[in-house]
Amino acid sequence: MQSCDVLTNRNKLVELKIAGRYRMIPVWATELSFEVRPGQKFDARAWKYWKPVLLLLNEVAKKEKLKINWVRIHSHFGHQGDVPHAMGWWDHEIKAMFLCHFDKETMLHEVGHALSSGYHGDPWAKQAARLYLKYLNGKEQKEAMVQLARYLSGRRIYKALYGEKAPKTPEIKSLWKGLDPKQ
């Protein structure tokens, strides 16, 4: 019974001043090796979607010895079209990650940028593939490797790893499109 109480308390939202603004953030997010900065109109119901991604990012940052100062996350419940910005990006200068999509592939894609030159060239593709193979399993891993092939450098890595041409990459759709926060 006590472990359930501890888990509940770690999911409890607390008000903290983050980057000059007061935000509601779960206790577990305050225990990460980087600061989590929810976007200005962040919906607290989105924390459940972000938790597995941010916990994995914390693990990856430690294992890969990656310094991340902070991570900005978004929520876009009720959005009907495509989100009008990138799903994620890495800023080498301030060592910060911006994530819109709450999937592990996008997060590891950005870690690949952090561990390489930053562009979608061969060094990035090698890092991204290594990260996908190390931290993802099953369907998630397979889908991430197919998404890697969206880039020329990724297609080369895919062919080298699997000995065959990568399948056609499906169109990327926003994870937020039509997502019901009550699910």
Image (tube, rainbow, N blue to C red):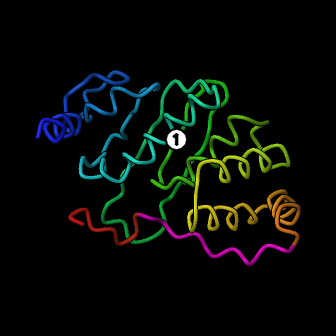
As drawn, is 143 to the left or to the right of 44? right
**What is the span of residues highlighted in magenta in the rendered image?**
164-175
Residue 176 rendering spot, x and y as whole percentages: 40, 64
Residue 144 vs residue 76, the one in the foreground: 144
- For mark 1, what is the residue? 98
- For the point 69% across and 43% down, the residue is 112
Count of marks placed on residues? 1
Q: For residue 138, which quarter of the picture?
A: bottom right
Verify whether residue 167 appears in magenta: yes
Residue farthest to the front, as pictured:
1
As drawn, is 61 to the left or to the right of 71? right
The secondary element bearing badge 1 is classed as: strand
As drawn, is 177 to the left or to the right of 146? left
Does residue 108 sit above or below 175 in this rendering? above
Residue 39 rendering spot, x and y as whole percentages: 37, 41
Verify whether residue 26 appears in magenta: no
**Main secondary structure along the magenta-highlighted residues:** loop
Report the quarter where the C terminus lies.
bottom left
Classed neighbour count for the residue bearing mark 1: other residues with Cα under 10 Å, few (<14), some (14–19), many (≥20): many
- For the point 49% across and 56% down, the residue is 103
Residue 125 vs residue 58, the one in the foreground: 58
Residue 71 rendering spot, x and y as whole percentages: 47, 34
- For the point 60% across and 44% down, the residue is 89
Report the quarter where the N terminus lies.
top left
Residue type, numbered disc 1: Phe
